[in-house]
Each structure stands twice: as structure tokens, then as C-alpha cells.
Image (cartoon, helix red, strand yellow):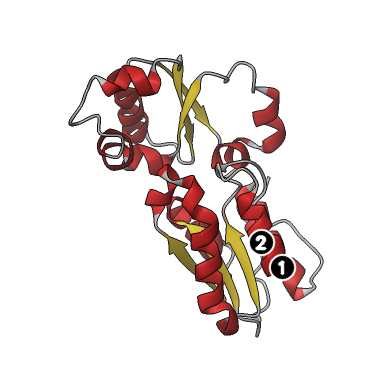
Amino acid sequence: MTSRPAESSRRQLILACGALAREVNSVIAANHLHHVTVRCLPAGLHNRPKEIPAAVRTAVREVRDEYDDILIGYADCGTGGELDAVLREEGLERLPGAHCYAFYSGIATFDRRAGEDMRAFFLTDFLVRQFETLVVEGLGLDRHPELRDIYFGNYEKVVYLAQTDDSRMRAEAETAAQRLGLAFEYRLVGLGELAPAVIGFTERQHGRPKEKRTGER
């Protein structure tokens, strides 16, 4: 049974990628972290990673005076270290790893499989739900189907890193792989290192000894 953390008087914020909203909120709810606020930047930045650092800086400065502690709910996410440079300036931390695929898989596991996954296109639950919007429409494949081979010609497979064990979602992910002309692989990974990172942030700021919470392994 999960023990309920003591209520905190600190005002804590997780400023997250919109693609993580459902998962971050599930960790907050499961662990009764009712004092933690979640705000999200547009998930469309997923396709425009160079815009992430400036967007994060602007959002942080807009809300800084409202919160005692802020965690940035992004990994590096294709910013090439530019997000980390912003966070050093702001004195803030982010989620671990290079991208959500790594922390969902577990960073050590993801790194160990790097060779076999070198030509993999990854999907998460969010990307399965938003495949039409972010991949098909976002890359213009609905208007120019010939772009499929340009964008995906060097990939060999779609790897679905599933946060939930949902047969309908799995079927949709497999259909997405077929549309891209790629092989399909399914891995049920859950929340990976996301939950410990969120819980650890709140516990470090509270000064409480860390104990196992719902969502941790």
C-alpha cells in the first residue's frame, strides 16, 4: 500500500512537455502529491526541438515568483544541450536522459539496446494517440505521401514503448508501422524512470528521506 506523503506548504511546479501531461499527472495522483501543479508547453514542440529551450526559459520566467520549486518535465529532447544551458542559467533540473524514449525504457536499458535500435522509430502512448496529428499531418504525409520514403527510408522498424497494456493502442501502433512501411515491435515499459524522477523532486525539496512510492520499481 502506498503511504500518503505529508502535505507540503511549498509551492511546487512541474513544467512539462505536453506529450507527458497524462503520465506526469498520473504519478501526481497516485502518490497524493496534491500540492504539485503541472503546467505543460505545447506538445507540437516535439517536432521543433530547437524551439524548446527558449520556450522553457520564457515559461519559467513567467511563473518563477509563483513557486518555490520547479522541475522541468523534459529530457534533452533533441536540443543538443541547449536546454541544459538554459537550466544552468535558471538553476533548475530536468528529467533524466536524452529523450522520453530513454527514461521510459530505463536509461541503462535504452543505452544497452542502442545498436539494435539504431534504425528504430519510437512511439509512446501519446504518439500513438497523436499519430495522425504529429506524424502524418505534422510531416505532411497526408498531402505528400511520397515524403514517407524520404523521412522513413532509413528506418527498419517501429518500436512501441507502451506506458499502458492496452490492446486497442497496440493495434493502432501496429497500423501506424504498416502505414510507414516498417516492421513492428512492442515493448511494455510503463513509466520507467519518470515516476522516480517526479517523486524524487518532491522529496528532495521537502527534505524527507526517500521511500518507495507508487509507480517506482
How dense is the environment of label 2, judged by Cα within 10 Å: few (below 14), some, or many (20 and up)?
A: some
What number is the disc on residue 87? 2
| Residue 108 at least partly seen | yes
Q: Amino acid at mark 2?
A: Leu
Q: Residue at x 30, y 30 (%)?
A: 172
In the visual, does 173 lie left or right of 106? left
- Under tag 1, what secondary structure? loop
Give the Cα distance between marks 1 and 2.
6 Å
Residue 189 coordinates in the image, percent (x, y): 56, 35
Within 10 Å of disc 1 (Cα), the crowding (few <14, some 14-19, many 20+) is few
| Quadrant of the snapshot with the N terminus | bottom right
Q: Nearer the viewer, residue 19 or 78?
A: 78
**Residue at figure coordinates x 39%, y 15% from the top left:** 153
| Tally of marks | 2
Position of 44 relative to 127 (above/below): below
Q: Amino acid at mark 1?
A: Gly
Query: Is the C-beta separation of discs 1 and 2 under 8 Å?
Result: yes
Residue 124 horizontal/vertical position (percent): 45, 38
Q: Residue 184, located in which quarter of the rendered image?
A: top left
